[in-house]
Image (cartoon, rainbow, N blue to C red):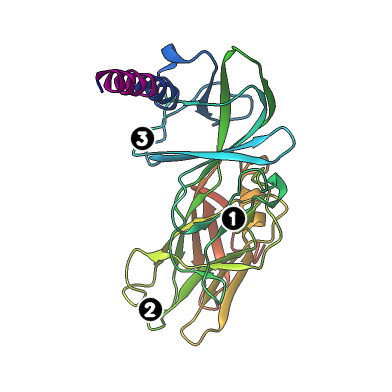
């Protein structure tokens, strides 16, 4: 009987030791790991920039690991964190070839497929922004960042660190419309087909979405209407439009959003510029006599519609 208890005690110690060793990898204590692959993250604020910055509004990180041929291996999540240049995530991986897809800031309004180990392929790993049945987006999408690391080799008995660059996918746009008839309720919206993304964060085919803003005041309060948007990725070749409608649903203003942004910033790179204030002053016929973007005037009274 005593012999059995001693054997059980020794076996328990052995299992506990193995558990602690494995847990050391998961909890980022690399001192107990002969084979550790550690991920670090930096927020790219400009092309070729090596400088990073903190993510004050992002407290969750999801890493999706695929093998060298693009087959899903596992997912690692970290919540309640502050992602900075000092932050790292150590993964318990066997030697082999791996690819990494990172989404930082995911919430319940971003939809991902159910990934099955050994089955789900990278080309089927698509993120979609949740929308209503009429393709409207009645809530602000949460700030979202993306990173992707192509195939990397992890050798036996190797301790390796990979730094993954993160790009911001979401944008904030404040639209201020001046001189609208104060007796009419108006609504402002942005339309774009940018709600679905491949693993690389390239925009996948999608229906046009209608982004609904949060208004800084009630629409009947004043002749100036302020609307705040969070929208998904902007790109030079997209067909995003800014629209203003009256209370009957009649469109009073319909403008190519990207064209106006490019007019203000001909060399803009939407990968690194994400915050815009668009200020439009109309005449009595809803024709803009002035448009400013981040303080820059881009048309005058004689220019008419762009």
* Residue positioned 73% across, 53% down in the render: 237
Q: Which mark is residue 279?
A: none
Q: Which residue is mark 2?
A: 182
| Disc 2 crowd, CA 10 A, few/some/many (<14, 14-19, 20+) | some
Q: Main secondary structure of the magenta part?
A: helix
Please tell me in which quadrant of the rendered image residue 243 appears.
bottom right
Within 10 Å of disc 3 (Cα), the crowding (few <14, some 14-19, many 20+) is few
Which of disc 1 and disc 2 is earlier in sequence?
1
Q: Which mark is residue 113?
A: 1
Write down the quadrant of residue 179 in the picture.
bottom left
In the displayed orientation, state which residue is furthest to the bottom: 248
Tag nearer the camera, 3 or 1: 1
Residue 242 is covered by the magenta coloring: no
Residue 63 seen: no
| Residue 24, image x, y percentages | 40, 21
Which range is magenta? 2-15
């Amino acid at each position: 009987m005593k012999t059995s208890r001693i054997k059980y005690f020794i076996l328990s110690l052995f299992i506990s030791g193995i558990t602690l060793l494995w847990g050391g990898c998961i909890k980022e204590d690399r001192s107990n790991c002969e084979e550790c692959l550690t991920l670090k993250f930096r927020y790219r604020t400009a092309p070729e920039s090596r400088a990073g910055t903190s993510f004050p509004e992002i407290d969750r990180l999801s890493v999706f690991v695929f093998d060298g041929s693009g087959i899903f291996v596992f997912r690692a999540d970290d919540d309640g964190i502050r992602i900075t240049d000092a932050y790292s995530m150590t993964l318990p991986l066997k030697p082999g070839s791996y690819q990494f897809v990172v989404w930082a800031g995911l919430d319940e309004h971003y939809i991902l497929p159910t990934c099955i180990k050994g089955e789900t392929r990278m080309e089927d790993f698509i993120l979609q922004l949740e929308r209503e049945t009429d393709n409207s987006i009645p809530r602000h999408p949460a700030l979202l960042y993306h990173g992707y690391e192509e195939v990397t080799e992890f050798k036996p008995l190797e301790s390796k660190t990979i730094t993954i660059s993160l790009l911001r996918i979401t944008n904030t746009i404040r639209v201020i419309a001046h001189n609208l008839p104060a007796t009419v309720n108006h609504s402002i919206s942005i339309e774009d087909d940018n709600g679905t993304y491949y693993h690389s964060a390239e925009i996948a085919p999608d229906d046009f979405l209608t982004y609904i803003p949060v208004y800084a005041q009630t629409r009947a309060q004043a002749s100036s209407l302020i609307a705040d948007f969070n929208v998904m990725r902007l790109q030079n070749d997209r067909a995003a439009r800014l629209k203003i409608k009256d209370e009957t649903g009649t469109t009073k203003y319909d403008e190519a959003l990207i064209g106006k942004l490019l007019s203000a910033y001909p060399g803009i790179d939407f990968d690194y510029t994400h915050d815009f204030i668009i200020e439009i002053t109309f005449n009595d016929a809803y024709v803009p006599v002035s448009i400013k973007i981040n303080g820059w005037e881009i048309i005058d009274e004689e220019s008419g519609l762009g």
